[in-house]
Image (spheres, helix red, strand yellow):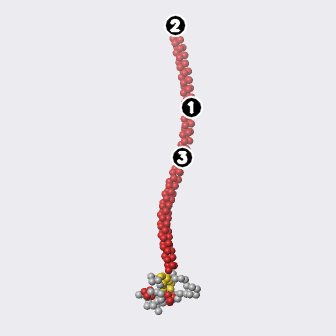
Amino acid sequence: RKKLAQRLQEAEENTEAVSSKCASLEKTKQRLQGEVDELMLDLERTNTARVLLDRKQRDFDKVLAEWKQKLDESQAELEAAQKGSRSLSTEVFKLQNAYEEVVDQLETLRRENKNLQGELPPPPTPGEHLDPPHLASCFPPPCRTLPSAPSTLELSPANVTDIVITKCPSGTRRAKGIAKLTSS
């Protein structure tokens, strides 16, 4: 009987120990279940955030692709503008050189004109006029006849187109004229 009582007591102690252990395991199970529930909520929030981030990433990729396209277009426009600018710069340089040449020629012609005006005889007085046949006598002999021209050169106001009066080295004035050749 003592043995039985002792066994019974041991069995009760074991039962209490197992019950205590079961209670401890139940508490651990509940704590772990709470942690699992929290982790599941975190997982859902993380998945929701991931979906939102994926959408944002796709939107960002679209915006980035649009900006890359705009950049490429802008670079192409810039290159075309730079090419046009270089072309226009070359054209401006050529025009500046041509302008400078024309200005130099103009200055030369002005000096020449001024020198020639200094050599002109005084203007005729009112009532005095130049007589083209009289001008013909001012031409030196080589100017009066040309090898392929008729033997006589008729000068009249109708056929004298340009008259230039120059000073000869001897100090006399000589008239040169461009006239139409007429046969007599």
Of circles 2 and 3, the one toward us is 3
Circles 3 and 1, Cβ within 8 Å, touching? The answer is no
Please give the name of the residue rendered at 54% of the width and 22% of the height, measured from the top-left corner: 25
Residue beneath disc 3:
60
Residue at image location 54% in from the left, 14% down from the top: 12
C-alpha separation, residue under disc 2 versus residue under disc 3: 83 Å
Which mark lies nearer to you, 1 or 2?
Answer: 1
Q: Dot 2 corresponds to which residue?
A: 2
Name which residue type carries label 2: Lys
Q: Is residue 103 visible?
A: yes
In the image, residue 41 above or below residue 138? above
Which label sits on residue 38? 1
Q: Nearer the viewer, mark 3 or mark 1?
A: 3
Question: Is the residue marked by circle 2 packed among few (<14), some (14-19), or many (20+) residues within 10 Å?
Answer: few
- For label 3, count other residues whose C-alpha is less than 10 Å away and answer few (under 14), some (14-19) or many (20+): few
- Does label 2 or label 3 sit earlier along the sequence? 2
Give how far across and how far down residue 181 sits, in percent. Answer: 47, 87
Q: Tell me the element at label 3.
A: helix
Please name whichever residue, 30 or 178, is drawn nearer the observer in this view of the structure.
178
Residue occupying the far left of the picture: 147
Residue at 56 percent across and 39 percent down: it is: 48
Residue at the spot 49% in from the left edge and 78% down from the top edge:
116
